[in-house]
């Protein structure tokens, strides 16, 4: 029963966003909304720049976070000594409890000036800065998921490698990683979902300019920060209504990503 | 009795503050089957783990005393830090209670220790793997399906595969932790025969719960049954 209620609720939210965004389709063509430019003065409510901004920032943050998280999880589960690994795992668990706004602050006051000076142009509020901070933000999710996957490798396999004189690195490369490919993919995809949905980091650090980004040092606006910024507009305005389309698009991307991850995980369990 | 291969001198073993083994003094003869017997929880498996230092993977485990093994004509304390654990484990093979093939093909399972040791020449690998599988009497059963997953084998076959994997590095000592307890009697008998054959080329140390097995194949017995005074 509760499962049914949950399902209905999820569908209701999607329906709500589509219905509330419907008036937009009367003003402009559906494709224009998804692929066009954003210029409310000219009655253009295209959200393409925001979709691109979201994809750039979340993909880049996952790309940065992946090797870092994989290395960290490998150290905690396989490579590191018991004590050091325990301390490190505690730190990672603590990271999940740090409020997002703190990461935002660190980004604004430490990272943004650094990027500005290193790049020698722009304000430093750009895709690169936002992605770097977001990479740190999603790392604990990824690390803990990877650890969970590594720890499911049967003890007997690890004993076999130990008894044969294998080093920790060999154990990781020859046994643990091949056994955890599905877990690694699932963890990465779920973190990508987390990066897609994050609002605050991009809002504080990405600069929020509505433009199609051409380089990592360009400012960008994500769907989530767009919703946050525009929600202050007049409730009856078309601008305001466009945020429901943003919500629906974000919802669909996230749903596809999460469903994909679950599908991979399920297949992994059946083997 | 054959000359000693291993000498254990005033050995204590602790797990955190809990003492598992106390003042053990034993000698293990070369090219013979030494059987370790005693009730559950007496520290038999822990005792076995002393010879390949597998106890080191357990956090909180600690050893005092000496375990002297004779490799290349002279006795050396295998617990000294300068004794490489990798070298030790290549010279001391181990077979576990439950067969534990790795999630790879039959051939790759047996070739795995060679891969760990960095031996790559195809022909050498092929020859050594074949020899090890033949030595365990498994060749006729698997020669046509070497590329199949090792988990497709029966329990008894898996255990012989694990023995082949332990033997491919030609170890001088082979440790066996209740190697037949999870197998049917016929598979168990095959493993027992194999162990007797292996005496020629290595020193075997086996934990066993089966008195008839001990009586049948053991040349030397170490009894962990607590004395009446304790």
Image (spheres, rainbow, N blue to C red):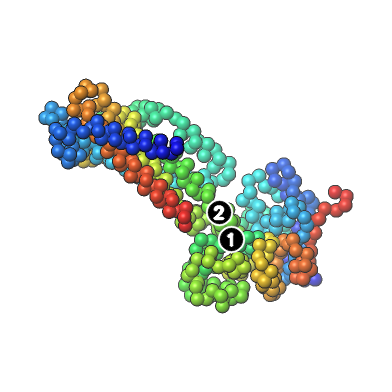
Quarter of the rendering containing residue A249: top left
- The residue tagged with tag 1: helix, strand or loop? loop
Residue B10 location in percent, x, y? 78, 53
Q: Residue furthest front?
A: A1
Q: Label 1 marks which chain's residue?
A: B
Relative to B166, A236 lies left or right: left
Total number of numbered discs in the rendering: 2
Where residue B22 appears, as percent x and y from the top left, is 78, 50
**Mark 1 vs mark 2, CA separation in Å:** 9 Å
Residue B174, image quadrant? bottom right
Q: Mark 1 points at which residue?
A: B100
Residue A248 at what x, y percent from top left? 28, 36
The image shows residue B171, relative to residue A220, as above or below, that is below
> Mark 1 vs mark 2: same chain?
no
Camera-nearest residue between B126 and B99? B99
Q: Which residue is drawn at 49% across and 48% down?
A: A149
The answer to whether residue B10 is above or below residue B190 is: above
Residue A154 is marked as 2
> Would residue B136 appear left or right of A64 to someone viewing this image?
right
Can residue B125 be spotted in the picture? Answer: yes
Answer few, some or many: residues within 10 Å of disc 2's Cα (few below 14, many 20 plus, some between 14 and 19).
few
Depth order, front residue of A27/B49: A27
Q: Residue A200 carries which label?
A: none
Q: Please tell me which residue is depicted at 52% across the width and 55% down the height of the picture.
A: A171
Q: In which quarter of the image is the N terminus of chain A?
A: top left
Give neighbour class at mark 1: few <14, some 14-19, many 20+ (Cα, 10 Å). Answer: many
Q: Which chain is home to disc 2?
A: A
Q: Are marks 1 and 2 in contact (CB under 8 Å)?
A: yes
Q: Residue at x 33, y 44 (%)?
A: A256
A190 sits left or right of A250 in the view: right
Residue A212 can be seen, yes or no: no
Secondary structure under tag 2 reads loop
């Amino acid at each position: 029963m509760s499962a049914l209620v949950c399902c209905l609720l999820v569908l209701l939210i999607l329906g709500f966003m589509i219905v509330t965004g419907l008036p937009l389709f009367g003003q402009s063509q559906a494709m224009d909304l998804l692929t066009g430019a954003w210029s409310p003065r000219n009655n253009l409510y295209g959200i393409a720049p925001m979709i691109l901004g979201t994809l750039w920032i979340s993909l880049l943050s996952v790309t940065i976070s992946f090797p870092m998280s994989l290395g960290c999880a490998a150290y905690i589960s396989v490579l590191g000594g018991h004590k050091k690994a325990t301390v490190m795992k505690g730190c990672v668990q603590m990271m999940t409890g740090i409020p997002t706004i703190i990461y935002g602050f660190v980004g604004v006051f430490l990272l943004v000036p650094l990027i500005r000076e290193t790049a020698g142009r722009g304000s430093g509020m750009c895709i690169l800065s936002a992605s770097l901070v977001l990479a740190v933000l999603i790392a604990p999710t990824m690390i803990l998921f990877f650890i969970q996957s590594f720890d499911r490798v049967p003890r007997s396999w690890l004993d076999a490698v130990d008894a044969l004189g294998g080093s920790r690195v060999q154990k990781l490369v020859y046994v643990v990683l091949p056994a955890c490919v599905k877990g690694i993919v699932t963890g990465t995809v779920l973190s990508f979902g987390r990066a897609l949905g994050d609002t605050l980091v991009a809002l504080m650090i990405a600069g929020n300019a509505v433009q199609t980004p051409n380089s990592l040092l360009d400012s960008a606006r994500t769907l989530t920060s767009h919703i946050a910024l525009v929600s202050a507009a007049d409730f009856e305005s078309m601008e305001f209504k466009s945020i429901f389309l943003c919500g629906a698009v974000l919802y669909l991307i996230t749903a596809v990503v999460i469903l994909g991850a679950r599908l991979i995980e399920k297949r992994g369990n059946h083997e | 009795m054959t000359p000693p291969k291993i000498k254990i001198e005033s050995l204590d073993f602790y797990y955190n503050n809990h003492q598992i083994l106390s003042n053990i003094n034993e000698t293990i003869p070369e090219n013979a089957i030494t059987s370790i017997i005693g009730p559950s929880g007496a520290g038999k498996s822990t005792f076995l783990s002393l010879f390949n230092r597998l106890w080191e993977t357990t956090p909180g485990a600690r050893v005092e005393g000496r375990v002297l093994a004779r490799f290349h004509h002279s006795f050396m304390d295998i617990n000294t830090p300068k004794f490489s654990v990798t070298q030790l484990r290549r010279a001391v093979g181990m077979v576990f209670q439950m067969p534990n093939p790795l999630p790879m093909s039959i051939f790759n399972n047996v070739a795995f220790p060679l891969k760990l040791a960095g031996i790559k020449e195809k022909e050498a690998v092929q020859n050594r793997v074949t020899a090890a599988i033949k030595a365990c009497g498994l060749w006729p059963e698997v020669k046509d399906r070497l590329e199949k997953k090792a988990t497709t084998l029966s329990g008894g076959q898996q255990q012989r595969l694990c023995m082949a994997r332990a033997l491919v590095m030609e170890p001088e000592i082979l440790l066996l932790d209740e190697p037949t307890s999870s197998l049917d009697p016929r598979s168990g008998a095959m493993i027992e025969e194999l162990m007797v054959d292996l005496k020629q080329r290595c020193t075997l140390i086996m934990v066993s719960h089966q008195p008839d097995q001990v009586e049948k194949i053991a040349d030397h017995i170490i009894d962990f049954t607590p004395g009446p005074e304790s």
